[in-house]
Image (spheres, rainbow, N blue to C red):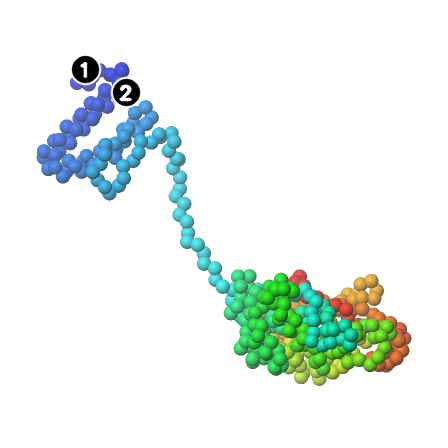
Amino acid sequence: MAANVKIDEGGTEPAFSRLYLDSRNRAARRCESSTGPSSARSSASTRAHIPYLSRGKAMPATESTNTSSPSAEPTDLARLPAAGPTNISSPPATTEPPTGLARLPAPLDYEQITLLDKQPVRGRISYTDCMESSCLRFVQAMLCDARSLNERGQPTRVDLDLVRARVPDVAVRDFFQSFPEILPAAEYAPGKRGYKAREAWARLVTHRPFFTYKRSACGVYKNEWLEGDTNGCFQWATEMEPCVHNVISVCRRFLGVDFAHEDAYKPMWNRHCDTNHEALHHDVSADAQPHLAAAMRQLSRPGFMELQARVLSPQTYFGSTYDTHVTFEVNGLGAWKWSLRRKFVRVPAHVLKEVGGDRDEEASKTSRIRTSWHSEISTWP
């Protein structure tokens, strides 16, 4: 039979393809007559999904009555994508909230603030709050709420339970009751929502006998008095002096740190005075380190905030100015460097005597003492 087959030269389909289809149809009819119509329908459904190749293209299948799978459209085989591995995407990883303090709040830059205290002729006293804002950020960090960490591991509010348990100063407790948020640094600028808090803090820290100040209750700048530019008897009560003495006093008076043991060996940090230990001593790192180490031990919270601080020897710049740095680590990583910037000033004999310099060998020979001029906290290292 195959020897008598003629090839259809003018058709679009070879003759053997038509013969093959005819033979399949006859086989289907024989199957239907022997097994029943359901078997034939199943066979026809199966045939509808079998492509027939002709000149590189798939021939369309007959429409199927089986609705369990859609019929394929005619497709150019040359355009079919190459087979490859199937990418199975894994479910997105869940981000666990930080459990330990990763970093301290960003330091605050200084701004101009205005007190309620008035000068004799020029209205209210106003100055830049470099030391006040440094102390505010420091106290916020030490009292931060472990449950308030943002996605960067930074605290966003103080722990009011901790404030009530640790802070001995009523005014400071009331302050944090009114201003519990630890805002980004930019939010404490004038006109921002945190500026009211920073100005309230600057007013809160004035007229405290345990701090030393660089401005009088009537607005006279202390450095002008030290250098003999202003004469008189003044009460130094506004604008905190940038110095280690005030850092230790903040820990003692505002954060409830007990320095009984350290004071027994280094009593110079527990005095009410207008001129502190640093005015007549250049390198106070060895004297201050026991107090700062004790403060960090007591303020640490195991599992959340392990603190360490180190008071560095002064770094001198241009001969007359120098920095005393206090570095802070949190959970073994560097966090802050608190720079307390000071300078030498030459003072008249009567001023030298009033501040006790006449009893100091170096000061009595040089007529110079040390005074403060700026505070700045920066991220470290």
Q: Position of residue 121 (x, y in %)?
A: 78, 74
Q: Position of residue 14 (x, y in %)?
A: 26, 20
Kindly state the secondary structure of the residue where label 1 is placed.
helix
**Residue drawn 28% across and 28% down?**
59
Which quadrant of the figure contains the N terminus?
Answer: top left
- Number of residues whose C-alpha sits closer than 10 Å to that of mark 1, classed few (under 14), some (14–19) or many (20 or more): few
Q: Under tag 2, what secondary structure?
A: loop
The residue nearer to you, when weighing 197 against 160, is 197
Q: On the rendered structure, is 314 left or right of 55?
A: right
The Cα atoms of the two marked residues, 1 and 2, are separated by 20 Å
Horizontal side of residue 359 vs 269, given as left or right: right
Q: Give how far across and how far down residue 316 sits, in percent.
A: 80, 65
Residue occupied by mark 1: 4
Label 1 with label 2: CB-CB less than 8 Å: no
Q: Say which label, 1 or 2, has the lower sequence index.
A: 1
Which residue shows up at 72% across the image and 68% down it? 128
Q: Is residue 146 left or right of residue 48?
A: right
Q: Does 156 sit above or below residue 74?
A: below
Q: Residues within 10 Å of mark 2 (few under 14, many from 20)?
A: few
Give, as a three-letter code, the residue at label 2.
Answer: Thr
Does any portion of residue 283 appear in the rendered image? no
- Of residues 71 and 204, which is closer to you in this image? 204
Which quadrant holds the C terminus?
Answer: bottom right
Could you say which quadrant of the image residue 252 lies in?
bottom right
Q: Position of residue 278 (x, y in %)?
A: 78, 75
| Residue name at image x 40 percent, y 39 percent | 84
Q: Nearer the viewer, residue 185 or 150?
A: 185
Task: Name the residue at 17% across, 28% down.
Answer: 25
Which residue is identified by label 2?
12
Quarter-of-image position of residue 193: bottom right
Image disc number at residue 230:
none
Question: In the shown orientation, is residue 31 left or right of residue 342?
Answer: left
